[in-house]
Image (cartoon, coloured by chain):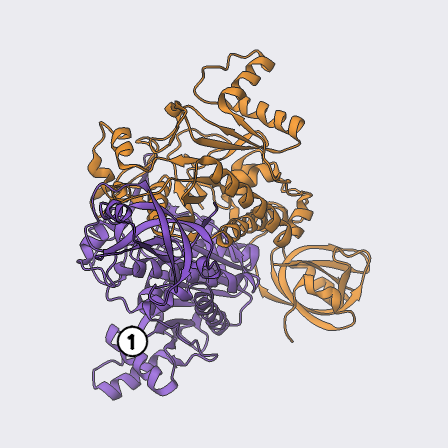
Chain colours: A purple, B orange
């Protein structure tokens, strides 16, 4: 008999079927036992009446892998609207001991470190699994949007000879006796590849030796990177980013609707025109409204970002807001200045619900501008990168979305580790 | 005027259009100049007759980024069947110096180390770019096949506290003062995630500190990993792998046909029933045919694999052949033995054109089997992994395809570095 999934049973009334999965929970009543079997599609309720069968199941601990043959019947009480009766249950694989927390509860009742230590079990909880399903759908939407816009996926090195973003926050590696580093971003490589494909993207891990133990930083995270040539300025990049975010939300709706339902979430609406505010205008508004001294600061504080998030929602009905024109001094060396104001940059951040989600902008594309920007540095370390600019590069720009940050904002997680399968940070290297 | 791509011009006869790209090549004749502009879709031929315009273009070096406005006309001589006449050419971005090799030649005329040192330029060559396009399409096909089969994509750590495959061949990292390692595979994580989603895949970099400088090994490569639960044995995994390979070939045909044409390649046919030969039967055949002593060896040699590739092509008309039942002694500790012969394993290799392309098999799923297999090891290093098996795991298995090896076999590259954007090996860390 072919195995069926929980989600397929509602078209099988009256038929004998076989399901297989994990013993999620059982309730033993006086005359009957209800057994919940969890598989990758959902949960099947199995009704046992025969005393020996009930006694046999009563001995099984949660997470036992079982197979059930039974007859599908309609049931208003069962979670999926159907249940299996007259079952035969067989044990496929037995656990050694019960889980350290109850997976059947709507919320896992344990502290975050315990959940992370036991990720192999805690991730089986339907709510945790739903978060991971939304993450997978988000990435699928990211790629789909760029595939249809003529971007090509690339795969670049994660071990590099020199730091890309700044000298700090890199992890040193012993590379056959030489010193190397984990890549902080694919920035150099995606720019080089603009010279090849004009439009490229990469989905891959990046590494930041972030020494602060915060609720929103990870030492490894998944960076959704895109870069495109033949732009006028950063606004062309912002337009592509908008369509990418819309596709991510749409793909979550298409592919992870059960996960959204379980978590009682809806995806945010991505406005056709995301509000845009210039960095200095933002500072003026914030200082006027809050009387906090803000003007003249080279960057926005977390409180500033929250204020702009509220402003955007109230004034524009948008959970997203672009801030453009950050001061050059706080942006990486490859950032293109504003042609009308060399102290400001053709860069942007996208805030989502009051937190920076995406950073992007136009990059320098002339070799001489790089030579100038890197004055005082050892250019040999950058040689392979600078080759792209020696040999003709169009105006270009791009952005990077942090996947875990997106998921954390979407789900309202207090700590980014709650939405990361196996987080890595200052203190955590396992599992 | 909206910019158009080279590949879009054949429906624009008589219209004035704008294209932009790299000056691929120019031929100056007595009365006329032909300029080839390369963009992400192909090459546009531009015809200049006006003497001043010809003189201006003659000064430009290859890889200058230019924009051209011109009128589309039919042309039997032009590569794309159309060309632009009455052009206005403007320079967008000027190179500092000409490329170290001529990108216009059908073959790049330089040694591999030179091409790799100048990857930012050599990858712009249409043949090199075509290889990268085929790689992107392959990965897209891998994901599409698994998405439609109920697999979920996962993203797992690339830095781990303990080696996964074996103690050798790992790269040590300084992780905030602690010793850690680059992940050799996502093996432990994909098995853990079988407990969550039952079917998972991951596309990500893996790292092997391979001390041998060979034409088929890289220190970082892209691993296309899948793992699935509720299998009977390794043959269920082999059936999924077949459909994945078929989808990879199909997606290359759909999305990278111009790249195939340029390289004069066709994708291999993936038979519905890939020939299967048991390890010991393979050894017997090889020893009988070649009179080389083969029986009793615990693994197949490269010569053995080539022999089997020839045999499969000649006897079965298949470029793929499965070898099953490798001796347990040569397989990793998590390999499931053959229930009928505990010295043999429920594992397989898939050979493609006489070279191992994929390794896979059924894994152990009972906690006690892991405790036994890891006897003598410090189990605390494996604790988070073993948690999955303590808490009930179904019979499961999976496989890993090395992307670069697939592309090397497909394109007939003599050295895997020829088909890798930015290879990493014993000697190479840049660009």
Residue A107 position within the rendered picture, expressed as x and y whole percent measured from the top left:
23, 63
Q: Is residue A183 visible?
A: no
- Where's residue A311, x and y in %? 32, 84
Which one is nearer the viewer's eye here, A133 or B138? A133
Quarter of image, res A264 = bottom left
Helix, strand or loop for disc 1: helix
Q: Is residue B14 above or below residue B273?
A: below
Position of residue B266 measured from the top left corner of the image (x, y, whole percent): 67, 43
Residue B273, image quadrant:
top right
Residue A262's place in the image compared with B150, above or below, is: below
Pointer 1 chain:
A
Residue under circle 1? A305
Q: Is residue A13 above or below residue B362?
A: below
Q: Is residue A17 left or right of residue A419?
A: right
Crowd around label 1: few <14 · some 14–19 · many ≥20 (10 Å): many
Q: Percent x, y for residue A136?
A: 41, 58
Left or right of A59, for residue B182: right
Q: Residue at x 28, y 33 (%)?
A: B370
Residue occupying image coordinates x 59% and y 23%: B307
Does any portion of residue B312 appear in the rendered image? yes
Q: Nearer the viewer, residue A15 or B218?
A: A15
């Amino acid at each position: 008999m072919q195995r069926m999934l929980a989600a397929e049973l509602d078209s099988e009334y009256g038929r004998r079927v076989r399901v297989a999965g994990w013993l999620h929970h059982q309730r033993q009543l006086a005359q009957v036992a209800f057994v919940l079997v969890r598989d990758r599609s959902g949960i099947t309720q199995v009704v046992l009446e025969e005393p020996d069968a009930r006694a046999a199941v009563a001995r099984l601990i949660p997470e036992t892998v079982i197979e059930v043959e039974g007859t599908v019947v309609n049931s208003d009480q069962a979670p999926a609207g159907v249940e299996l009766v007259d079952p035969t249950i067989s044990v496929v694989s037995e656990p050694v001991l019960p889980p350290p927390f109850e997976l059947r509860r709507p919320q896992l009742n344990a502290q975050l470190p315990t959940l992370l230590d036991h990720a192999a079990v805690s991730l089986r909880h339907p709510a945790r699994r739903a978060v991971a399903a939304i993450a997978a759908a988000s990435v699928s939407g990211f790629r789909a949007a760029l595939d249809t816009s003529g971007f090509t996926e690339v795969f670049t090195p994660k071990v590099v000879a020199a730091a890309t973003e700044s000298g700090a926050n890199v992890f040193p590696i012993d590379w056959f006796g030489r010193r190397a580093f984990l890549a902080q971003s694919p920035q150099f490589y995606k720019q080089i590849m603009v010279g090849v494909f004009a439009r490229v993207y990469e989905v891959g891990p990046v590494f930041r030796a972030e020494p602060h133990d915060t609720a929103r930083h990870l030492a490894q995270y998944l960076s959704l990177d895109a870069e495109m040539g033949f732009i006028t300025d950063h606004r062309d990049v912002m337009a592509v980013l908008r369509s990418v975010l819309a596709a991510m939300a749409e793909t979550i709706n298409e592919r992870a609707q059960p996960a959204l339902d379980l978590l009682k979430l809806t995806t945010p609406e991505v406005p056709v025109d995301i509000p845009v505010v210039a960095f200095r205008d933002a500072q003026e508004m914030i200082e006027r409204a809050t009387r906090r001294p803000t003007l003249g600061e080279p960057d926005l504080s977390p409180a500033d970002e929250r204020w702009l998030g509220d402003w955007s929602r109230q004034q524009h009905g948008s959970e997203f807001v672009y801030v453009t024109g950050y001061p050059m001094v706080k942006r990486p060396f490859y950032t293109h200045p504003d042609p009308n104001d060399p102290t400001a940059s053709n860069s942007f951040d996208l805030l989502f619900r009051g937190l920076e989600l995406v950073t992007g902008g136009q990059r320098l594309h002339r070799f001489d501008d790089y030579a100038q920007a890197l004055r005082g540095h050892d250019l040999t370390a950058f040689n392979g990168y600078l080759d792209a600019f020696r040999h003709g590069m169009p105006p270009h720009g791009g952005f990077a979305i942090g996947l875990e940050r997106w998921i954390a904002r979407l789900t309202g997680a207090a700590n980014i580790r709650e939405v990361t399968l196996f987080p890595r940070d200052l203190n955590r290297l396992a599992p």
